[in-house]
Image: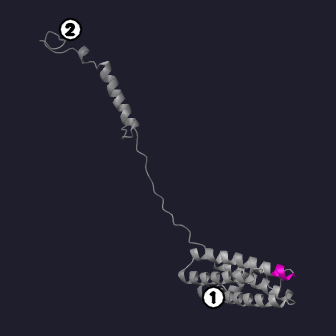
Amino acid sequence: MGLGSPNSWNDVGVQSPASSRVGRRTFLTGLGGAALVAVTGCTNPFSSAPTTRTVVSQAPPPVDPLMSLLATTRLHVERINAGLVNIAADPAGVVVLTLVQADRAAHLAALEAEVARTTSTPADSAATSAAAQPGQTVSISDDPAEIIATVLGDCVTAQTQFRDGVQSTSRYRAALFGSISACLATHRLVLQPS
């Protein structure tokens, strides 16, 4: 029987249990393969796979800038009105502020009409909290150059707010905000010191 060593076979021809031992090299090769499988991320039969859960939530609706723009416009109109009273001695300043005041009053009326069209909240009560309260006076300088500079600063601020408001509103309001922003750009040119 030329198979195996003479000590591994018994008299009946059956291989003894001592010869069925796993060799050290075979054992280490198998252990290395199992480690490789575990490291590479293959499914490990000894652990459970983590459960993946997807949670879906809705983003909040975009904030409508209309009410803050209405309050800003109302405050700016009140400052222009106060400036017209204080600049009465400067005829050139009165002409410029009167033109700006007419446009800003038209902007205020358009914004109030938009509030009335789309909400049940009256425009006057909605913006009163953010603008000057009725009966309060808006203070502005007596110096014509400072009055013009204040109104110019208000135009710069308002133009930025209306331009930014275009991005988060409906098409109709975007057109309204864009036209007001363009008008404010002309005000900035008119109010620049010469």
Residue in the foreground of this view, choosing between 15 and 96: 96
Residue 64 seen in the figure: no
Residue 46 x/y as whole percent: 38, 37
The amino acid at mark 1 is Ala
The amino acid at mark 2 is Asn
Would you say the magenta stretch is mainly helix, strand or loop? helix
Residue for badge 1: 116
As measured in the structure, the alpha-carbon distance from the residue carrying label 1 to the one carrying label 2 is: 106 Å
Rendered residue at 67%/83% (across/down):
186
Displayed quadrant of residue 132: bottom right
Displayed quadrant of residue 167: bottom right
Can you tell which of label 1 and label 2 is closer to the viewer? 1
Which span is picked out in magenta? 142-147
Residue in the foreground of this view, choosing between 46 and 63: 63
Residue 5 x/y as whole percent: 19, 10
In-image side of 176 versus 131 (left or right): left
- Tell me the crowding category of disc 1: few under 14, some 14 to 19, or many 20 or more residues within 10 angstroms, Cα based: some
Displayed quadrant of residue 138: bottom right
